[in-house]
Amino acid sequence: MTPNIAPKGSRSELRNRARMLVSCPDQPGIVAAVSRFLFEHEANIVQSDQYTIDPEGGMFYIRLEFDLDNLDARRDQLKTEFAKVADRFSMEWTINRAGRKKRLAIFVSKEDHALLELLWQWQAGDLEAEIAMVISNHNDLRGLVESFGIPYHHIPVTADTKAEAERSQLELVVDKVDAVVLARYMQIISPKFIEHFANRIINIHHSFLPAFVGGKPYAQAYNRGVKIIGATAHYVTEELDGGPIIEQDVQRVSHRDNVDDLKRIGRHIERIVLARAVSWHVEDRVIVHGNKTVVFN
């Protein structure tokens, strides 16, 4: 492991590229209207993905990447003028610069496997994000994190100090990061905290939700005698382990596997599932509608 090395690779080729996400009631003319708008504003569409739940009364989703000369100077005007198109079709939409890496705060406890996968992918340049900080209720992983040149903040959490700890956490992250990643943080996030990061807090839960919600899911799975275990990355909402699911994966197990075996097998699933979900989020590949997601991967 080489310390203090940030991901390599220039993003200058993306300085004029933007990503557009749109969701709206399905109806004729949506793609034509969006494409015509971008053409009239001299933008060149380089990628387009779309999906409809039901052409008759369902929802329509589209993800576009386009290049536009002098994007930084023209983006605000582009948004203002696109709002007229969006109003006509009752769209929910965003336009984000592809060349700007989203800033992440990673929350951890004592286990390092999910965190390490993110750090390795970041170091290799495979995670298109900036890891702004790691926040933990324990000091165990400080040396590991700081070896990557990433700030580490230790904020202890107890039942009596939880509210104070969250205030300290919010001071560190509000208006300073774009998303929060719970890499086996093992603490329940309060509704007040969630309000600041709606659909921007990604958690990894060590079961194939909706099975085995809550604590000790591997013990629950063992007691139930399951033949498949899994992990689920989802956005955090006030409902415990009930937020919109971004990614899941599974692996077969057998009666020969005890709880410790399930945990060992599960750690590999957790790290891969979380890394995929975070990558898709920072690349603007996820649209949330209600308690579901559409993921253009």
Image: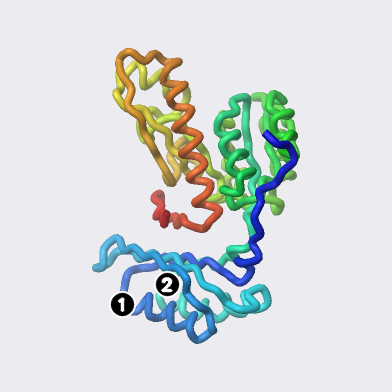
* Amino acid type of the residue that numbered disc 2 sits on in the rendered structure: Ser
Quadrant the N terminus occupies:
top right
Give residue 192's quadrant in the image. Answer: top right
Residue depicted at x 56% and y 68%: 18
**Mark 2 / mark 1, whichever is N-terminal:** 1
Q: Are marks 2 and 1 in contact (CB under 8 Å)?
A: no
Looking at the image, can residue 168 be seen?
no
Check the image and report above or below for 294 versus 163.
below
Give coordinates of residue 222: x percent, y percent. Answer: 36, 17
Residue 11, numbered circle? none
Quadrant holding the C terminus: bottom left
Mark 2 residue crowding within 10 angstroms, few (<14) / some (14–19) / many (20+): some
Where disc 2 sits, the SS reads: loop
What residue is pinned by disc 2?
A: 90
Q: Amino acid at mark 1?
A: Pro
> What percent of the width, then of the height, locates residue 176?
71, 51
- Residue 183 drawn above or below residue 13: above
Task: In the rendered view, tell whether residue 196 sits above or below residue 75.
Answer: above
- Give the residue at mark 1: 28
Q: Is residue 84 visible?
A: yes
**Front residue of 72 and 54:** 72
Q: CA distance from mark 2 to mark 1?
A: 13 Å
Identified at 61% across, 72% down, the residue is: 16
Secondary structure of the residue carrying numbered label 1: loop
At 69% from the left and 24% from the top, the residue drawn is 140
